[in-house]
Image (cartoon, grey):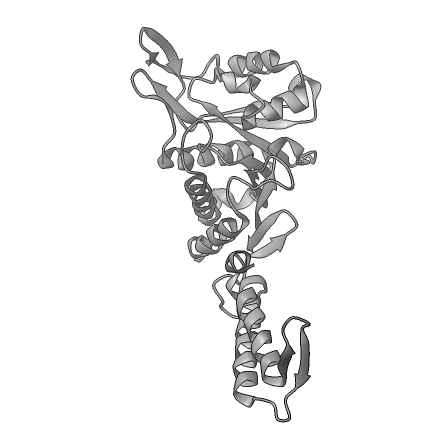
């Protein structure tokens, strides 16, 4: 029981023990085995006062963490059913728990961004454990090869550089931070951008770096601005096969959107949804809800003008 209690938020612990102090100041235990209590002839005022203070402090901390009042550090972070949300002017920024393929992005102003490597030849497109593969296999079933063909067609006239992907294997790289837009691919209503966020070199292997996140988000935004789209769904990028810690990826993404928010070109963004992977509604997400909330609260400072 104590181990479970220690995992609770601070305000919950304060309220719990505050109630115990209040109860202990009013009632005495007659028989522990039968949980028999009787009131004191005179209440213990000190115990009651300590309890009231603890309960009040717990309520205050809860209000600070969940409601929008004053200048509390978490005042703009709101709890959603499956994540947390904050708003800055016309921008609503959500961090949601789930799987990218499960979210509805059917509106005419909505786009899904999916991570790719610098060569846009990802085997991940066939891997349901990756965000790219899970989305393509869910929405396009057995047509992954056709989606890859569309991407290659889009890249046909784009500049590239031949690099050693593996020992003895030289292939064209389009660089990190390259976005390829597919509007209504294979006659579907979807709007997809594949954005390169990982790189691979002989002797180094596949990896991502924190700075790649900023380039990738900027590329996604340019695509949305070009297509006049305002709503985005995007999974954590760089934290899968790229190897970045999930919390690092989330922080970099949030800071990137904060920077875009201050840019005149960023005003088209109205609704951004970052999806943190969770295998099922009852499974632990790759980032805990507590850390999601902390990340949103921490990045509040980057949205301030």
> Residue 214 in the image: x percent, y percent?
41, 37
Residue at (54% x, 35% y) in the render = 235
Going by the image, does 107 lie left or right of 5?
Answer: right
- Residue 239 vertical placement versus 291 (above, below): above
> Residue 211 in the image: x percent, y percent?
36, 36
Task: Work out whether residue 230 can be spotted.
Answer: no
Task: Work out whether residue 133 can be spotted.
Answer: yes
The residue closer to the viewer here, 121 or 6, is: 6
Residue at (70% x, 19% y) in the render = 187
Going by the image, does 203 lie left or right of 19?
Answer: left
- Residue 161 vertical placement versus 259 (above, below): above
Residue at (54% x, 16% y) in the render = 151
- Residue 194 vertical placement versus 3 (above, below): above
> Residue 88 in the image: x percent, y percent?
54, 54
Question: Residue 12 sits in which quadrant?
Answer: bottom right
The residue closer to the viewer here, 19 or 42, is: 42
- Residue 215 vertical placement versus 53 (above, below): above
Question: Residue 215 sits in which quadrant?
Answer: top left
> Residue 302 in the image: x percent, y percent?
42, 53
Screen quadrant of the N terminus: bottom right
Q: Name the residue furthest bottom.
A: 42
Screen quadrant of the C terminus: bottom left
Going by the image, does 174 lie left or right of 185?
Answer: left
């Amino acid at each position: 029981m104590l181990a479970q209690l220690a995992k609770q938020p601070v305000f919950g612990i304060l309220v719990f023990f505050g109630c115990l102090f209040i109860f202990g100041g009013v009632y005495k235990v007659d028989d522990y085995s039968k949980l028999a209590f009787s009131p004191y002839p005179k209440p213990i005022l000190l115990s009651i006062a300590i309890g009231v203070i603890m309960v009040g402090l717990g309520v205050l901390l809860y209000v600070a963490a969940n409601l929008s009042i004053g200048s509390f550090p978490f005042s703009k972070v709101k709890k959603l059913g499956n994540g947390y949300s904050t708003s800055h002017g016309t921008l609503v920024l959500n961090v949601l728990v789930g799987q990218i393929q499960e979210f509805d992005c059917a509106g005419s102003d909505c786009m899904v961004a999916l991570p790719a490597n610098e060569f846009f030849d990802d085997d991940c497109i066939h891997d349901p454990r990756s965000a790219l593969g899970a989305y393509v296999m869910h929405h396009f079933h057995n047509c992954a090869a056709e989606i890859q063909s569309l991407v290659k067609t889009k890249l046909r006239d784009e500049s590239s550089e031949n690099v050693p992907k593996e020992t003895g294997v030289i292939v064209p790289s389009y660089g990190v931070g390259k976005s390829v837009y597919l509007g209504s691919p294979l006659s579907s209503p979807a709007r997809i951008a594949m954005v390169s966020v990982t790189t691979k070199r002989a002797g180094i292997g596949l990896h991502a770096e924190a700075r790649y996140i900023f380039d990738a988000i900027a590329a996604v935004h340019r695509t949305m601005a070009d297509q006049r789209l305002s709503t985005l769904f995007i999974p954590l990028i760089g934290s899968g096969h790229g190897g970045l810690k999930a919390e690092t990826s989330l922080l970099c993404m949030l800071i990137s959107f904060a920077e875009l928010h201050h840019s005149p070109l960023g005003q088209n963004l109205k609704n951004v949804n970052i999806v943190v992977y969770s295998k099922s509604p009852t499974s632990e997400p790759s980032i805990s809800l507590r850390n999601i909330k902390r990340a949103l609260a921490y990045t509040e400072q980057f949205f301030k003008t």
